[in-house]
Image (cartoon, rainbow, N blue to C red):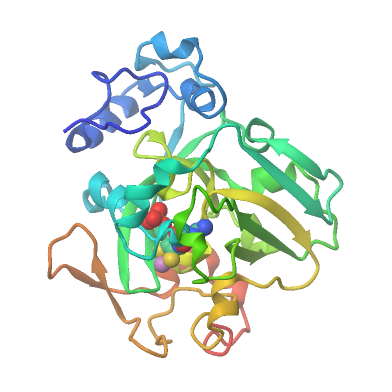
Amino acid sequence: MLIKKAPLAGLTENDVTPHHLYLNRRKIMAAGGALAVTGLAGACSQQDAAAQSPSVRPTDGALDFATTDYRVSDGDLTPYDAVTGYNNFYEFGVGKSDPARHAHNMTTDPWSVEVTGHAERTGTFSIDDVIDFNALEERIYRLRCVEAWSMVIPWIGVPLSSVLERFRPTSDARYVAFETYLNRDEMRGTRFPVLDWPYKEGLRMDEAMNPLTLMAVGLYGEVLPNQNGAPMRLVVPWKYGFKSIKSIVKINFVSEQPTTSWEESAPREYGFYSNVNPERAHPRWSQSSERIIGGGPFARRDTEMFNGYGDQVASLYAGMDLIENY
Ligand SMILES: Nc1nc2c(c(=O)[nH]1)N[C@H]1C(S)=C(S)[C@@H](COP(=O)(O)O)O[C@H]1N2
Ligand SMILES: [Mo]
């Protein structure tokens, strides 16, 4: 099976890695070749000449994405079809296959992001002013949904800290709030009052600046498919999936804890922090284990505190009661 959707502009259809060969390709990359990612910026902003260049070229430093594996390993990767075919993106409907069916209607190019609040640089920025496409990294992270399932995905992006630092937040910026694109013609799910659109999320500043927090622009070596939150979305690996807001158009530096969509819709069920916690059940179901998407009907694993990333993030919550602050 070949990847059909939005290959990197540097790849032709024939060059695109079948997903079962993805790991072999990564071994080749590690051995000295590299998957060119110059085209990723091009694919987001303009179709450029990079489309003609070979897909594998010698490493020259600047164009590669670095690979860093955190906690989870290659062998656990969720199949591409599940990553892109089983999604929550309520703006396109509440069914798991609605995003794959309808998200192609979303316009992701051109894309701009409005930056407001407590920062020295505010205003409207193009995606190339927000993301350094020469500094992309791959991170294999588990995404754990509050609905008690999980996937392991090879994300490509930049640390969120590198994005936020560009705007030079001031000391009054104690939290950062994000909003998703909203277009009722393109997003059929927003015609229904499931949530108070646009989708809103937020992080405490130290959570946002933690090196694990990623602003993703790709997965499995490709630009993000629309259903996964193109052209840029958060991945906050120690929190339930809903904190990883998709298709971001607003970044607001604020001093008070911001309102978030899920907390607003059901405050007893979803809190601001939403750290993965097997000991704190959702009021309607247990969070102690999770279904492994793509692993067959009975594949389950025990849920880990902070989704397994406790070594890196537990210190952020020292002294806090994580049952109270769910
Ligand atoms: N804008 C927006 N972002 C969103 C959602 C959404 O409905 N709208 N769903 C969230 C939930 S509940 C999950 S589990 C993840 C799913 O990400 P994925 O589809 O890439 O696996 O996206 C999160 N981000
Ligand atoms: Mo979720």
Residue 276 appears at what percent x and percent y?
44, 74
Question: Residue at coordinates 63% horizontally, 84% vertically from top-left?
Answer: 319
Q: Is residue 241 above or below residue 108?
A: below
Q: Is residue 97 toward the left or the right of residue 93 in the image?
A: left
Q: Is residue 167 above or below residue 304?
A: above
Q: How many discs mark residues in the rendered view?
A: 0
Residue sitting nearer the eye, 118 or 227: 227
Residue sitting nearer the eye, 163 or 31: 163
Quadrant of the snapshot with the C terminus? bottom right
Q: Is residue 98 toward the left or the right of residue 256 in the image?
A: left
Residue sitting nearer the eye, 73 or 199: 199
Residue 3 appears at what percent x and percent y?
26, 32
Q: State which quadrant residue 258 falls in.
A: bottom right
Q: Is residue 19 above or below residue 208?
A: above
Question: Residue at coordinates 49% horizontally, 71% vertically from top-left?
Answer: 194
Q: State which quadrant residue 210 falls in.
A: bottom right
Residue sitting nearer the eye, 112 or 194: 194
Q: Is residue 88 something that shows in the picture?
A: yes
Q: Is residue 241 something that shows in the picture?
A: no
Question: Residue at coordinates 57% horizontally, 90% vertically from top-left?
Answer: 324
Rendering quadrant holding ligand 2: bottom left
Q: Is residue 166 above or below residue 118?
A: above
Quadrant of the snapshot with the N terminus? top left
Q: State which quadrant residue 20 falls in.
A: top left
Residue 18 appears at what percent x and percent y?
21, 31
Residue 213 appears at what percent x and percent y?
55, 54
Question: Residue at coordinates 59% horizontally, 53% vertically from top-left?
Answer: 182
Q: Is residue 320 toward the left or the right of residue 235 in the image?
A: right
